[in-house]
Amino acid sequence: MKMHIVGAMKLQLILLSLLFATVGFGADVAAGKTAYDAACKKCHGADGTANPAIVKMMKVEMKHLGSKDVQSKSDAVLKKETIEGVGKMKAIPSAEKDVANILAFVRTLKQ
């Protein structure tokens, strides 16, 4: 019986470690959605689907933020791209203070 409790506790610690590694310690999804709505929604849409008018105007391909291509990127890469921009996406330095929360919200868009 004691072994099962120890094993279950180890499993919980592993799962919590994975969770924090994925969304960042202390990240707040609700705050991330608010920050996302302010800084990202205009181009990336409320649900991560690219705004067709922006795609057409900028002549770019924008993958859904929940797509495997986007979701497979590391947190570090997504944080860097969010703050510094990527391709024709301009830098959004104002997002830096909320980037962990924004990333936590973007991770909820996984398809």
Image (cartoon, helix red, strand yellow):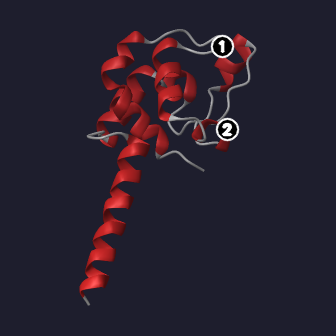
Asked whether, in this view, residue 51 is left or right of residue 105, the answer is: right
User: Badge 2: how crowded within 10 Å, few (<14), some, or many (20+)?
Assistant: few
Camera-side residue of 13 and 24: 13
Residue at x 30%, y 20% (from the top left corner)? 97
| SS under mark 2 | helix
Q: Which amino acid type is marked by label 1?
A: Gly
Q: Residue furthest front?
A: 3
The image quadrant that residue 64 belongs to is top right
Asked whether 42 or 19 is in front, the reply is 19
User: Where is residue 48 shown, x and y percent of the image?
Assistant: 56, 36
Quarter of the image where the N terminus is located: bottom left
Label 1 crowd (10 A; few <14 / some 14-19 / many >=20): few
Residue indicated by mark 1? 87
Q: How many marks?
A: 2
Is the C-beta separation of discs 2 and 1 under 8 Å? no
Residue 76 percent location from the top left of the image: 48, 28
The reply, left or right, for residue 11 in relation to residue 74 is left
Question: In the displayed structure, would residue 104 be above or below residue 44?
Answer: below
The percent coordinates of residue 21 (x first, y second) are 40, 44
- Amino acid carrying label 2: it is Asp
Q: On the image, which quarter does residue 59 sit in?
A: top right
Q: Cα distance, mark 2 to mark 1?
A: 15 Å
User: Residue beneath label 2, please?
Assistant: 69
Residue ID at (52%, 45%)? 109
Q: Where residue 6 sits in the image (x, y, percent)?
A: 27, 76
